Amino acid sequence: MKRNRAFTLIELLVVIAIIAILAAILFPVFAQAKLAAKKTACLNNMKQFQTAQNIYTTDVDDVVFLWEYYHTFDVAQATAPDRSYGNLIAPYTKNDDMHKTPNSPFSIRSRMYNANFPNPDTKGALKRDQQLYNLGWLTDYGMNYQSWTGFFRNPTKPGGIDFNPQSMTQAENAAQTIMSLTGIFDRTASGGLLDGGQLPIDPPCRFWEDGTDTWAPAPGGSTGRYYFGGWNPQSPNAWNVYGGAWPYYSNKVTVGFVDSHAKMIDIKQLAAGCNVRQNSNGRVFDTSIYMWDLR
């Protein structure tokens, strides 16, 4: 009678070695495929945001979004949902999850209930409006806000804050003018990420070569411009080392342009055409490649 031969120890070790080799080859491939899928999803989110913003501006005579109402977070922001970015864009996106890029570690719910903002559960009928306000502020798809709206002190306005929203038609080169970027809200002392994304993102340079301002002009009654410190290259662990923009994918930041197309570019390429200085005090030397201004 013929007996079945068992595997020898050597044969088992050979099989295990082959499996280990195949795993070592395939796991990085799977990881790259997963990262590529996340990049595609992020680009798709940005394109949808740009399309939503363009549709919104078409509905309001081409004027871009306001992105804030009050500056002080102890005020019930949701009392003015018609003037805040998260609330205004929601009817055009109809998808809260779009505010999160796949590589971000922060959930949508953690943004809605972030401790830096009022708790939606305390707002009664305004609960949903407060959620949208909080989510809009902590979106991963922030705005080139100084070029498009500015943020100004004005004692005659609610909360002492005013804006000067620009028309989308002012962008002379829609395919090369930044509207949105992926951003971060804060970082730890060691450089780790905190809290989610960032709606207002500062451009890398503020002035033309002749010293005049490239940012949105101040409205009447304004007593000064507020901004978040611009680019902060002297502090590599600061949240605004790149003005609030952030590369979630191997030094690549996702950028949305006025014509609605989106692409990923190296984070340092954002400063093309200008000399970066602390607090965005540098000057634009090549307007043909600088992407933040409306010229």
Image: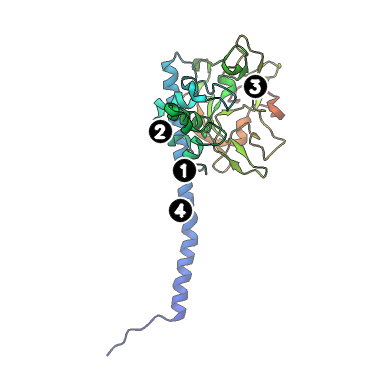
Which residue is under mark 4? Answer: 30
- Drawn side of residue 6 relative to residue 241, left or right: left
Q: Mark 4 or mark 1, which is nearer the start of the sequence?
A: 4
Q: Quadrant of the N terminus?
A: bottom left
Q: What residue type is labelled 1?
A: Lys
Image position, residue 149 (x, y; %): 56, 19
Residue 218: quarter of image: top right
Q: What residue type is labelled 4?
A: Phe
Mark 2 surroundings within 10 Å by alpha-carbon count, few (fewer than 14), some (14 through 19), many (20 or more): few
Can you tell which mark lies on residue 95? Answer: 2
Residue appearing at x 48%, y 46% in the figure:
35
Q: What residue type is labelled 2?
A: Asn
Image position, residue 213 (x, y; %): 66, 17
Which residue is under mark 1? Answer: 38
Image position, residue 19 (x, y; %): 45, 67
Can you tell which mark lies on residue 226? Answer: 3
Q: What is the distance, in whole Å, between disc 1 and disc 4 at their CAs?
A: 12 Å
For the residues carrying marks 1 and 4, which lies nearer the camera in this image?
A: 1
Mark 3 surroundings within 10 Å by alpha-carbon count, few (fewer than 14), some (14 through 19), many (20 or more): few
